[in-house]
Image: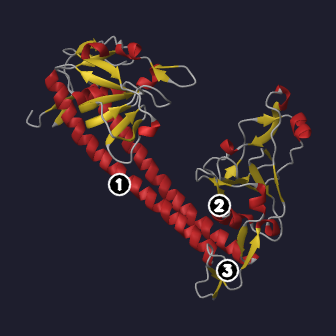
Amino acid sequence: MGIKKYINYKESGIDWLLDKIPSHWEVKRIKDLCRMQSGFYISANDFQTVGFPIYGGNGFRGFSKEYNHDGEYILIGRQGALCGNINYAIGKFWATEHAIVVYEKKGINKFWFGELLRLMNLNQYSLSAAQPGLSVEKIKRLKLPLPPLKEQTQIANYLDTKTKLIDKKIKLLQQKIKHYKAYRKTLINETVTKGLDKSVKFKDSGIDWIGEIPEHWEVKRFKEVCYKNHTGGTPSTSNTNMFGGDNIWVTIADMKKDNLVFDSKLKLTDEAIKTSNIPITPKGSLLYSFKLTLGKIAFAAKDIYTNEAIISILPNKNIVLSYHYYMLPIYLLLNATENIYGAKMLNQKLISNALLLHPTIKEQQQIAEFLDAKTTTIHNIINNIETQISTLKELRKTLINEVVTGKVKVTDVKQ
């Protein structure tokens, strides 16, 4: 199959489609092409490890002993932040009340229709609420361009072939990213545990989960090596005089992918700092999140303040903080306990008594410099792969847009 331009075009009169459409195409409302029906509630207690797939507002959810649909269907997410997303279900499955099942009418190609619905970005029609949701009646009235069935089928077949090739490339690139992330983790683990000198003699650390360490390394508690530390605080959220000042106040949400924290979403007034007795965290300090979201770590790029979910480790002459940037996320989590649900938990006492590996200052610096160089290279490789993935996703989107809206015509190769 190939593509070429149509000869004649006309105004579509479709709000979301600014371009003209082929002159022989029709304009129909979604409800003219299909019937829509939400699925049915299923209790979380009825979820199984095997069985029939369950589809909700964001796609696959798990498995059920029973099914309420059998066949091939387009599913539209009805509720949640991703409402309006498009999925396909084949065979026996359970559609929950958060999924809209599409029953297309005769003369409508399923895959063509599904990809056109995806292109329409139905999420933009969600109702404003704490829990975003689609109004089925509203989207049923939306207009769309309708080619003859033969062209729908040609478009569907063309897209099926092209998008599968793109999706295969994307999957391979995503697997590469997983590989590099796993390599990065292994590299850091091995380096902060065994050091850089492969000829050094080892000794038993005396701790099962640490194992053997270089003979001249020590095992010390956090409070012995990171003795200059403090946690932040949170002023009264009901007092508006506390917020809107000039003081950077870092929460876990401000600790992004980057390893430096320059700013915060919320700022505190001088009154808030004084009233809540929040200590200043000087530039260069290491920040570690230990409540709710565990293990986020970054450096303070400026003098800042933090909330109580973050412990700030201040510089001192006996440690190299850039080494601890790599070591702490491993060893603090190893010292964590678990709640009744199996989730990791840390508190100031656990952190204070956590056992850490303590190489010489010189080795800490060497390890930090080595890992900085290696992880920067890995980071750049991953960024490059992510750029390739973004380019392919944009190509996929452009490809779908061009053929389902009639910018180009799908033809048989012999044409």
Establish if 116 lies above or below 88: above
> Label 3 amino acid?
Ser
Label 3 element class: loop
User: Which residue carries the number 3 mark?
Assistant: 205
3D distance between C-alphas at marks 3 and 2: 18 Å
Label 2 element class: helix
Residue 352 left/right relative to 136: right
Q: Please count the marks in the image.
A: 3
CB under 8 Å between discs 3 and 1: no
Q: Earlier in the sequence, mark 2 or mark 1?
A: 1
Q: Place residue 5 in its image quadrant.
A: top left
Residue plotted at (81% across, 71% down): 318
Badge 2, how many Cα within 10 Å: few under 14, some, many 20+? some
Establish if 33 lies above or below 383: above
Residue 149 left/right relative to 341: left
3D distance between C-alphas at marks 3 and 1: 41 Å
Mark in front: 3 vs 1: 3
Q: Place residue 156 in its image quadrant.
A: top left
**100 or 85: which is nearer to us?**
100
Extreme-left residue of the structure: 414
Residue 406 left/right relative to 306: left
Q: Position of residue 203 (x, y in %)?
A: 65, 86
User: Which residue carries the number 2 mark?
Assistant: 333
> Label 2 amino acid?
Leu
Asked if residue 10 shows in the view, the reply is no
Q: Quadrant of the N terminus?
A: top left
User: Which residue carries the number 1 mark?
Assistant: 172
Q: Earlier in the sequence, mark 3 or mark 2?
A: 3
Establish if 143 lies above or below 350: above
